[in-house]
Amino acid sequence: MGTTRPSIVVVAFPRAKMTLYDPGIKVALIMSGPGLAQGVVYNEMVSNVDLVPTLLELAGLPYPGDQSQLHGRSFCGLLRGQSYTPNGFIFAEKTYHTYYDPMRAIRSDRWKLIANFECAPWQETAPDYQNNAKGYVEVSKALNVPYDKQYHPPFELYDLENDPYEQHNLADDERFAEVRNELIVALRDWMKATDDPLLDGPIAQGAYRERIKAFKEI
């Protein structure tokens, strides 16, 4: 008789997909190639924007156009066991998914700060909750989050060394006010450096522009 393989169901859960918590922004990265060490695990923080300059350097190709237009930096030196200065911070952002819910984040080895720019529900749930979002609804109900925690606070600060699952928001704890403020300034500087349109006000969805145009034409 043949064996029956167990079925595996993968669903996204609250505080993961559609968020800037670590389960929502961490991505597995496996690299192999000539001159790269085998079986080595690196804990240094790298970002998606670091991939293009890294791959160009590994391939021995020049940067196209103006190198200053690349926001990332190569981690080729890390892979080759050469000189490498790790990133002090990495950044993450979300503006839209199911609906408008703009947030930006800055992460160091120890700290994570999330800035929420709208008072949106703590867990984004797609309207098709009977099918592809069913897991969100069921788990959200099971967690039974208190009403005063059901909407984003302006800031979230997490000590990842002592709270790796980001359960205890320290943003309003005066003991960590200096850390919080330093991260806010660094995040704001990054948003300015990358011309983040959110600094100038809410970002209109494409649907809004089309619908307001139709509304005004009648």
Image: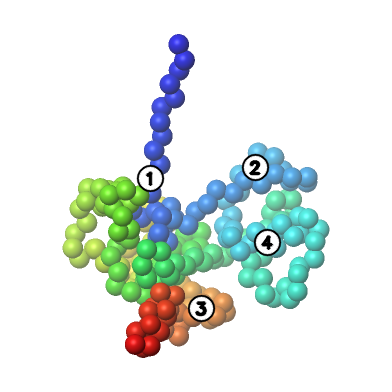
Mark 4 vs mark 2, CA separation in Å: 21 Å
**Residue 192 place in picture, x, y as percent:** 53, 81
* Displayed quadrant of residue 118: bottom left
Numbered disc in front, either 1 or 3: 1
Look at label 3 and name its amino acid: Asp
Q: Secondary structure at mark 2?
A: loop
Answer with mark 4 or mark 1, whichever residue precedes in sequence.
Answer: 1
**Residue 157 place in picture, x, y as percent:** 38, 65
Mark 4 vs mark 3, CA separation in Å: 21 Å
Q: Few, some or many C-alpha atoms within 10 Å of disc 4 (few <14, some 14-19, many ≥20)?
A: some
* Displayed quadrant of residue 78: bottom right
The reply to whether callout 2 and callout 3 are in contact (CB within 8 Å) is no
Look at label 4 and name its amino acid: Val
Query: Residue placed farthest to the front in the image?
Result: 218
* Residue 88 seen from this side: yes
Point out which mark residue 44 bears: none
**Residue 167 place in picture, x, y as percent:** 32, 56
Numbered disc in front, either 4 or 1: 1
Look at label 2 and name its amino acid: Val
Residue indicated by mark 1:
11
Q: Residue at x 59, y 49 (%)?
A: 29
**Residue 166 place in picture, x, y as percent:** 37, 56
Residue indicated by mark 3:
196
Residue indicated by mark 4:
52
Q: Few, some or many C-alpha atoms within 10 Å of disc 3 (few <14, some 14-19, many ≥20)?
A: few
Mark 4 vs mark 1, CA separation in Å: 30 Å
Look at label 1 and name its amino acid: Val
Of the 4 image quadrants, the one containing the C terminus is bottom left
Q: Residue at x 80, y 65 (%)?
A: 62
Q: Secondary structure at mark 1?
A: loop
